[in-house]
Image (spheres, helix red, strand yellow):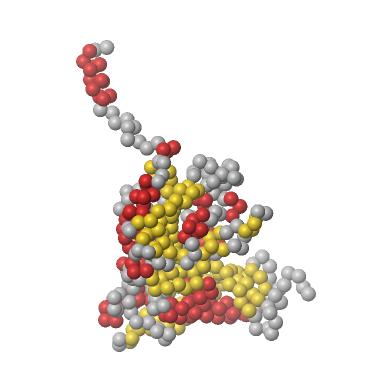
Amino acid sequence: MNKKLIILLTMITTLLSGCWDSKESERMLYLYGLGVDFEDDQYKVYAQIIDFTNIAKSEQPSNPDAIQSEVGYATGRTISEAIYKLYNSVDEQLFWGHFSYFIFSQEVLKEGRINPIINTYMRLIDTRYQTWIYSTEDSVKDLMLSTPIINKAISLSKMSDPINSYKQSSFIEPLNIRNLLIGMDEPGHEVKIPLVRLVNNWETEKGKDPISSIDGITVISPKENLGIISGNKASGLQWMTNKTIRSGISIKRNTGEEQLISVILQNNKVTVKPIVKNDKVLFDIHVRNVATVSGFEGDVTEKEIRRLTEKKIKKQIKETYQAGLNINADVYRLSEHLYRQDVKAWKRMQKDGKIELDENSIRKIHVDLEKVNSGRKTFDETIKK
């Protein structure tokens, strides 16, 4: 071979980058979730490390007895200080690329303490805006130690993968960091963070199996924690968003007996129209969806189902709105609806991005069941008494 060619090839190979700076997967720990509490002027951080070796090729761990995750703990005057203490207590490098969710205590959501946490998180190069956010009144540590039922992969838990269960029961819309930042920036500068609780309504042969459950919302602004709306008081939220996929309600019939009708509602569509008169604004709400009867007692008619369902949805919308007023929260973002549709009126009426609301601010609520399906059969009982 030509001597000059050999020299040239030798020089070229020395310039190849190779894989000198690559990270070996077995030399990394995968951070999957963070729980943050605040106590005695200190941030308390709980970090969940997940083991992918058992779930990389399956939705269930290959070894049912394998430990899927471990939770570490550290405190600090700032969130960064606490995280670096965690770095000092682990054996390998922590990788943030698979990070999926935050859980914040109610104390963290007070006085804008969430702001430096999000600021620190978004400055990390491996993080994403699709990270889910939750609030809780329960123990942050206990929630992070809970695992999915029947030993499903922890990567498919409700907190790390909320969309799957939301498709079946759209109670509280999941919130990610992207929508948190948008909600804080847009009028009236409030965000509804899903409220998660630890419940014990599942059991195995070994005993109770604690599991996380979405039970309502915590409403926050950039500066404060406005409060919690939970349980039935939060039911109206599902009818005030076009993202509701499927939800169900049960309605008591007016028959003099304890008879119920259960209805599944889909294709929810809502429009909010502000009506401005001088320096006063009222809102007309129109909700449309499709109903499918899932169960009932006694023979019913389509007319009765339509009437009772529309009445129940309207009632839930009013109750949740009132619950929002009780904590000075604009739960339906009516301020933003005015901002989008009549910005001049919004500028006249707004204060710190919000308009003043009271019990009479919603003028009309019209609920329209565009279709009522009987399911697989008719509106008659399957088994006649």
The answer to whether residue 272 is seen in the rendering is: no
Q: Residue drawn at (25%, 16%), measured in percent from left and top?
A: 6
Q: Based on the displayed image, in which of its 4 quarters is residue 66 positioned?
A: top right
**Residue at the (45%, 80%) spot, across then down:** 322
Residue located 70% across and 82% down the image: 257
Is residue 41 at least partly visible in the picture? yes
Residue situated furthest left in the rendering:
4
Give residue 232's position: percent from left, percent from top. 53, 74
Q: Position of residue 152 (x, y in %)?
A: 57, 50
Report the label total. Answer: 0
- Left of 3 or right of it: where is 242? right
* Left or right for 1, reference 54: left
Position in image of residue 370 (x %, y %)? 54, 73
Left or right of 367 on screen, residue 187: left
Quarter of the image with the C terminus is: bottom right
Judging depth in this view, the residue of 1 and 43 nearest the camera is 43
| Res 180 quadrant in image | bottom left
* 247 and 117: which is toward the camera: 117
Q: Residue at x 30, y 53 (%)?
A: 123
Residue situated furthest front in the rendering: 40
Image quadrant where one finds the N terminus: top left
Q: Estimate the x, y position of residue 193 in percent, counting from the top left.
A: 43, 66
Residue nearest the observer in this picture, 49 or 41:
41
